[in-house]
Image: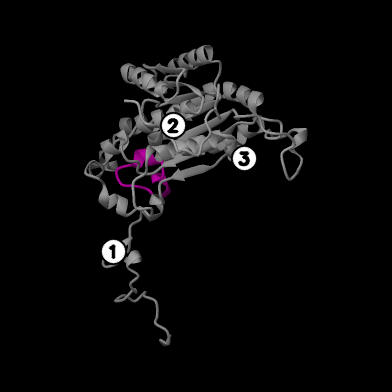
Amino acid sequence: MPLQKHEYLSSVWRDGIFTDKVVFCTGGNGSICSAQVRALVHLGANACIVGRNVEKTERMAKDIATARAGSKVLGIGAVDVRNVESLQNSIDTCVKELGGIDFLIAGAAGNFLAPLSQLSPNAFKSVMDIDILGSYNVTKLALPHLVASAKKHNSSSSLPHTQSSSPSSSPSSPPSPGAGGRIIYVSATIHYTGLPMQTHVAVAKAGIDALSANVAIEYGPLGVTSNIIAPGPIAGTEGMDRLSKEHKSGGANVAKRIPLGRWGFIKEIADATVFLFSDAGNYVTGDNLVVDGGAWRTSGGSPGGDFTYPDFILSGAEVTGVGGGKRKSGAKL
């Protein structure tokens, strides 16, 4: 079902900033990735999304195309990111029909809840293959097109290792409208601290973060940027519906533990995507952009007892009844 603009994009972005750019997205029929692509299409891009489910992928492509009249959105199903041949065929189709690839979103992922004691080697390998190998495969195949896009679209002042790269207070020439050669990997934050029943996912996302960093290092000299977007708990997504019972009942307890006090919106992931792919993100690469309302910072929980977060902080009460409390003025050491 088509979304209203305010559901997937903030009003701060100028229409047309991605005119004639092409985004290729794995996992594009999912809740988050489809919103990322939809935002780019609204702002002028054309797109190719791929997924394993043919009907779902084709249906989502048609839905995304409603974001802008005249847009071209390809939906290619029966594509398994673990299979290089199927990925190559979809990339070839994208380039043939849309003219190239300027942006890549690697969003295909596998997830389920399982404690380590119940996690079989095959289940673990399946997630590694989808997340890490799949991200590597699509990166490897798309990079020649991304390098070509960076060379074509990026202004001389934004490209490194050129005569224009000498220190100065401002670019030597106005930037061309809309850069090219950009990659975003959709990761997570659970590997920052660890999370029960998510060993497989934590390991996979750590690998994706490392992949992104190395792509940034090796392809930065060619003008390609590579970054991570790490979503926190996002409301209304298939992933949270699958993995969280509390999400289905409103998730008030989880939201309470998030510093900003609420679940995230898919629009906020899409906005982060627009930022990194726009001229505003020209000098951002090798970075992890966390969009989680501060959730991972409090994932370790609160001290417990009478000091529940954030209730105790908001109460303004003094810490009493414990040896680690602040000493009152004048108290002897």
Residue displayed at 39% across by 82% down? 328
- The disc at residue 36 is 2
Q: CA gap, disc 3 to disc 2?
A: 21 Å
Specify start and end residues of the magenta stretch as a single range. 187-202
Image location (x, y in percent) of residue 165: 74, 37
> Is residue 74 or residue 203 the one in the foreground?
74
Q: What residue type is labelled 1?
A: Gly
Residue displayed at 34% across by 64% down? 314
Image quadrant in which the N terminus is located:
top left
Q: CA gap, disc 1 to disc 3?
A: 42 Å
Judge whether 73 appears above or below 280 on screen.
above
Q: What count of labels does the image hold? A: 3
Per the image, the residue denoted by label 1 is 304
Crowd band around label 3 with a 10 angstrom C-alpha radius: few (<14), some (14–19), many (20+) = few
Judge whether 178 appears above or below 288 on screen.
above
> Is residue 175 or residue 161 the one in the foreground?
175
